[in-house]
Amino acid sequence: MPLAHEGMANSNYSCSICGNTTSKWSGRCEACGEWNSISEDIGLSQGPTKSSLGKSRGNYIPLGDLKSADKPLERTKCDLEELDRVLGGGLVPASAILVGGDPGIGKSTLLLQAAAKFAAKGLKTLYLSGEEATSQVKLRAKRLNLEEAQIQLGSDSNLRNILTTLEKERPKLAIIDSIQTIWSDKVDSAPGTVSQVRSAAHELTTFAKRSGTSIVLVGHVTKEGQIAGPRVVEHMVDTVLYFEGERGNQFRILRSVKNRFGAADEIGVFEMTGLGLQQVTNPSALFLSSRGKPSAGSCVFAGIEGTRPLLVEIQALVSPSPHSQPRRSVIGWDSSRLAMILAVLEARCEVQFSGLDVYLNVAGGLKITETAADLAVAAALISAKENIIIPEDFVFFGEVSLSGAIRSVANMENRLKEAEKLGFKKVASPKNTKLVKGLNIEVFENLDLLSFVNKISDGKKKITAEDHNSNV
Ligand code: TYD
Ligand code: MG
């Protein structure tokens, strides 16, 4: 243990990965298990001293007296429809938003485009970059054809200077790119450390609440998928958006993981082009557009992301394994969920996957989290294993339980409508799907996975929905 850490009874230490605080230094964080992530917190952790206690009592008002709560939230649209929807219908004044994502995914590009749209409405917009010089930001703006945008650019990383600028300018929107580069001279540690990031985020969100400025903080993500620095920043802000996408794939998904003013899990879809990010208003059509000829192991899942239906292709590949322990590889879905579906198929339906490598992929670089994808995954696996081609006008949704039963899922109507709109003629789904009326789509209801698997295996015989549903 370093000598410098000895004998500091009043110090606090915190982990730069998970934000856990302890009273003594150690080489490994007890909470998240990370090595060498603990550093000393200076400046924030000392509790209130007598002299620092406020003299006046806090002002409290009865909840019922609050008149402003009767009014709907005032929102300002950024005129980037995909972004506005993810925000819950536009930017709320005095709110703090964290936009996280891998380096190079397009955060600065997205926010510069949004800032330009915002400024075009005559609203004062500030873009402060701690990472790039103003000339570099200008170069990007030129590439995006946004040279004429009325954005105020700044390149500063000192928190005190930033707050002074904000106080003087009082913009409607301020973008801080990125929170990891901001440092406060009140905190005695390097930029990017937990105490610096926390202090900067705290001061900036407090400014937002006090002044009515909407503040967007850009945050980098570590390879473990967390906002680098502390998780605590996520708790401080009102909205947390993640910008995700696969490298080498042009699609980008903006996802709200927390939103005090709207639905979480809402997504916006963008495409990275030579001229910046373009909005994708009909993502289902796009995600399915590059589907090749129907082949074994591929099927379409009728999903919902946030409030929007989204159809995606699920691909599976099953091949004999040369290893004693076969591979289970998943991209875009949960690997433990795949293990569960494989176990249910083995235990309840006698479809064996031992000795076989299994690969599962969600096409287009999308990540799905819904359990409603279970049935589509099962269909793709059976189709891959038995070499059965699923007709291309079929979609799937439904949750599989450990008993092998197929459970209902939410938003059936929206899923069916989207499928119908995109020309799908048949759906394999849980019981009671037929209660959704008025749709021109043939419904194959399923009670349990075993009969579903049998029906797929009979697929070559061409059964109709009537045959299929007769025993449901
Ligand atoms: P950037 O917004 O700098 O990413 P972040 O701020 O998340 O680190 O985006 C950088 C990437 O985007 C870079 O690899 C180049 C690419 N890009 C385009 O493909 N087209 C464009 O018009 C722009 C501005 C960037
Ligand atoms: Mg950037």
Image (cartoon, rainbow, N blue to C red):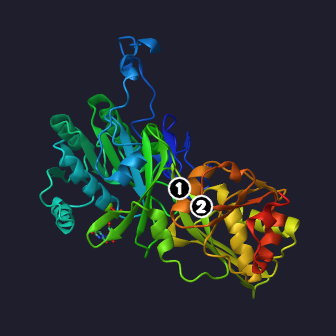
Q: In which quarter of the image is residue 136?
A: bottom left
Split into 4 quadrants, where in the image is the C terminus?
Answer: bottom right
The amino acid type, in three-letter code, at marker 1 is Pro
Closer to us: 417 or 173: 417
Q: Please give left or right for residue 402 compared with residue 61 in the image.
A: right
Q: Name the residue under label 1.
A: 309
Look at 60% across and 55% down and name the residue there: 439
Ligand 2 occupies quarter? bottom left
Q: Does the residue labelled 2 lie within 8 Å of ligand 1?
A: no
Q: Do the residues labelled 1 and 2 touch (CB within 8 Å)?
A: yes
Closer to us: 58 or 142: 142
User: Circle 2 — which element?
Assistant: strand
The answer to whether one can see residue 452 in this image is: yes
Counting from the top left corner in percent of width and height, residue 217 is at 34, 48
Look at 85% across and 56% down and name the residue there: 403
The answer to whether one can see residue 357 in this image is: no
> Which residue occupies the extreme bottom position in the image?
322
Closer to us: 262 or 157: 262
- The answer to whether residue 320 is above or below residue 413 is below
User: Circle 1 — which element?
Assistant: strand
The amino acid type, in three-letter code, at marker 2 is Ala
Decide: few, some or many residues near mark 1? Use Cα within 10 Å; few <14, some 14-19, many ≥20.
Answer: many
Look at 36% across and 40% down and name the residue there: 96
Look at 17% across and 59% down and name the residue there: 134
Closer to us: 220 or 450: 450
Q: Is mark 1 within 8 Å of ligand 1?
A: no
Q: Mark 2 points at which residue?
A: 302
- The answer to whether residue 369 is above or below residue 43 is below
Counting from the top left corner in percent of width and height, residue 413 is at 60, 50
Q: Please give left or right for residue 33 compared with residue 147 in the image.
A: right
Counting from the top left corner in percent of width and height, residue 40 is at 46, 45
Of mark 1 and mark 2, the one earlier in the sequence is: 2
